[in-house]
Amino acid sequence: MKRKKPILKKHFKSKKGFSLLELICAIMIMAIAVSATATGLAISYESITKNSLMNKASAKAQMYCDIVMTYVEKTPSHNPTSVWDSSLDLSKNKLFANQPNTGLKFDSIIQTSINDDVNALDNSMTAKQYDTASIGSRDFDISEMAYVVEFQGKYVNSEGKEMVSYKITTYVNYGTNGTTTCEGVVTKPEFAE
């Protein structure tokens, strides 16, 4: 019998496992992927948290706007931008503290009632009225609901009655420096009856 000559094979080194260089490269790729994912998750978490705080503050601003609007709508008042008989009409005007043409500052009883109602909904909140000029320069206070009442205008309705509109804006702070607002308009007779 003839013996076959074995074909000479080149002996390559074993490919079992990873070389040190391959292992280091794999670890670096994993580290880059994990850091990118962690950064993305951190940004997402921050965004979700901020949006959650903003949504809660927006809901509060709407509730507080409803409170102020209810007081404006239900409390007898005279248009403070018109001329009216101070002695007779002042006794009927329960909403505004000032004489005609001096501003839209609420009576102290109304201010206290609004503050009490806001505090009843959230005992950490207080309510404070500002005028249009000073609202932009107020201090950031997370526990304060600020509100502004503005005169929008007057008109005569279809029944021939003179009506006035007031715009109410509430400001609620959230987070470290965010503020959300809610606006509403109340239309009512110009003079209390």
Image: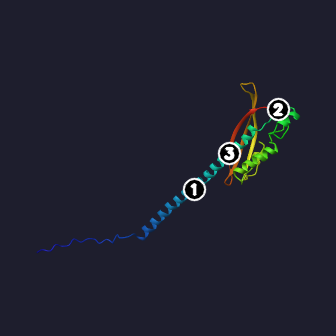
Residue ID at (38%, 70%): 17
Query: What amino acid type should be assigned to the residue bearing mark 1?
Result: Tyr
- Residue at the disc numbered 1: 45
Query: What amino acid type should be assigned to the residue bearing mark 3?
Result: Met
- Quarter of the image for residue 108 reads top right
Count the numbered circles shown.
3
Residue ID at (70%, 48%): 172
Where 21 falls versus 85 (above or below)? below
91 lies left or right of 22: right
Instruction: Kindly report which numbered mark, 2 or 1, lies closer to the viewer in this rendering.
Output: 2
Instruction: Kindly report which numbered mark, 1 or 3, lies closer to the viewer in this rendering.
Output: 3
Real-space Cα separation, disc 2 to disc 1, in angstroms: 53 Å
Query: What amino acid type should be assigned to the residue bearing mark 2?
Result: Ser
In which quadrant is the C terminus drawn?
top right
Of callouts 1 and 3, which one flags the residue occurring earlier in the amino acid sequence? 1
3 lies left or right of 193: left
Where 17 falls versus 169 (above or below)? below
Viewer-closest of 55 and 13? 55
What is the crowding at mark 2: few (fewer than 14 residues within 10 Å), some, or many (at least 20)? few
Real-space Cα separation, disc 1 to disc 3, in angstroms: 27 Å
| Helix, strand or loop for disc 2 | loop
Viewer-closest of 71 and 140? 71
Where 49 falls versus 99 (above or below)? below
Of callouts 2 and 3, which one flags the residue occurring earlier in the amino acid sequence? 3
Instruction: Kindly report which numbered mark, 2 or 3, lies closer to the viewer in this rendering.
Output: 3
- Please, which residue is most extreme toward the right here? 87
Q: Label 3 near label 2: C-beta < 8 Å?
A: no
- Residue at the disc numbered 2: 82
- Residue at the disc numbered 3: 63
| Helix, strand or loop for disc 3 | helix
| Helix, strand or loop for disc 1 | helix
